[in-house]
Image (tube, grey):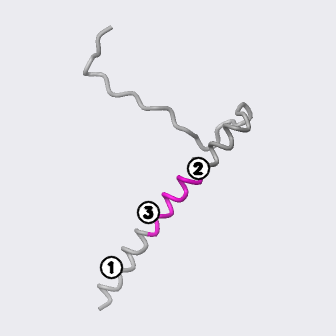
Amino acid sequence: MPFIEDEPPRKKPAAHAVGEDLSRLSEHELAERIIVLRGEIARIEEVLAGKKASRSAAASFFRG
């Protein structure tokens, strides 16, 4: 079957979905998810820190 350009690209399934049933996962899979989620938390914390710094700099600028 030829590739049809009108079809949107398919998304990869999420590595983890909040609230997902974890009982079927092995210990190894659970440990891998913890590593992935810790990395994601660190990434989110970096973005949050940047946003806080930007807000603080803007507030200082407008205060005078």
Quadrant location of the N terminus? Answer: top left
Disc 2 element:
helix
The x and y percentages for residue 34 are 64, 48
Quadrant in which residue 25 is drawn: top right
Counting residues from the start of the chain, the first of labels 2 and 1 encountered is 2
Circle nearer the viewer, 2 or 1: 2
Disc 3 element:
helix
The residue wearing badge 1 is 58
Q: Residues within 10 Å of mark 1 (few under 14, many from 20)?
A: few
Counting residues from the start of the chain, the first of labels 3 and 2 encountered is 2
Q: Residues within 10 Å of mark 2 (few under 14, many from 20)?
A: some
Q: What stretch is highlighted in magenta?
A: 37-49
Q: Which amino acid does label 2 sit on?
A: Leu
Q: Residue 9 carries which label?
A: none
**Residue 20 vertical position relative to residue 48 in the rendered view, above or below:** above
- Spatial CA distance of label 2 from label 1 is 31 Å
Q: Which amino acid does label 1 sit on?
A: Ala
Tag 3–tag 2 contact (CB < 8 Å): no
